[in-house]
Amino acid sequence: MQVTNENILEVVSDSICPWCYVGKRRLEGALKLLGPAAPRVVWKPFQLNPGMPVEGMDRREYRSRKFGSWERSQQLDARVHAAGKEVGIEFAHDKMLRTPNTLASHKLILFASQAGRPTDPVVEGIFRAYFVEGRDIGNAEVLGEIGASAGLPKEDVIRALSDDELGRAVLLEEKRSHSFALNGVPTFVLGGIPFTSGAQPKELLASLIAQHTQAPAGPSCDLDGECK
């Protein structure tokens, strides 16, 4: 099948967005429902916290300040945890000690794409490392190991993460994502047109993809970084 814009599904996502991970699982279910008609998935970058220090921040301190209290943060985590269990993700919020800067993780995804490697194992590895294993996905060594697990030479990954040109390419892709006037992530784009956002049920997502129709947003992380 010839690949055109009409059968490329772009997913605008951030590595620190829990609803993006849930949305990925639901998308996988939708693609199975679509069978041979399923589009090819391409992951596009978005930073919910572009001003985050490169070294990240203590998660409890950051989220307590952002949401007004640690209790409010835990309430949001509980909703995500319940949704994750429905799709086989065991969110381990107790292991997440830091809120990372995600630019480096997006560089890894783009590097894999430029190297001609499938990006899904990289995206999955990044999500799992942070949300299930509690690892710091802003750390080059951690990302090097994730890349190696996806078939990329670890040394090449670590070298790429320090490549300013690759960083500029990510920011250019992100600028395009902003041009869609997003309200949150994940956002799904087909044929260059955003048609829905949020972690939609697989049946609805499959129907929207098949019919090229639009729908209101589902659970997502908004542009202020609140995941609800």
Image (cartoon, rainbow, N blue to C red):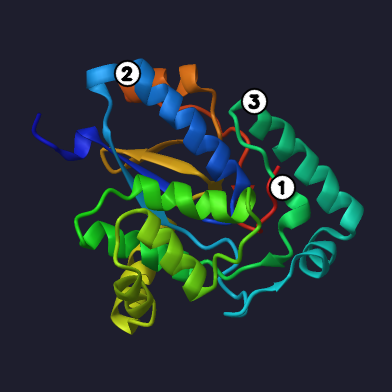
| Amino acid marked by disc 3 | Glu
The image position of residue 100, as x and y in percent, is 61, 68
Quadrant (top left/top right/bottom left/bottom right) for the N terminus: top left
Residue under numbered circle 3: 86
> Horizontal placement of 56 versus 180: left or right?
right
Could you tell me how far apart the alpha carbons at marks 1 and 2 are, in whole angstroms? 31 Å
Could you tell me how far apart the alpha carbons at marks 1 and 3 are, in whole angstroms? 15 Å
The image position of residue 145, as x and y in percent, is 44, 64
Q: Residue furthest left?
A: 2
Disc 2 crowd rating (10 Å Cα; few below 14, some 14-19, many 20+) is some
Quadrant (top left/top right/bottom left/bottom right) for the C terminus: top right
SS for dot 1: loop
| Amino acid marked by disc 1 | Ala
SS for dot 2: helix
Instruction: Tally the numbered discs.
Output: 3
| Identity of the residue drawn at 74% across and 50% down | 93
Kindly identify which numbered label has been placed on residue 34.
Answer: 2
Q: Earlier in the sequence, mark 2 or mark 3?
A: 2
Q: Earlier in the sequence, mark 1 or mark 3?
A: 3
Query: Visible in this render: residue 88?
Result: yes
Residue under numbered circle 1: 92
- When the figure is inspected, residue 114 is found, relative to residue 5, above or below; the finding is below
Contact (Cβ within 8 Å) of mark 1 with mark 2: no
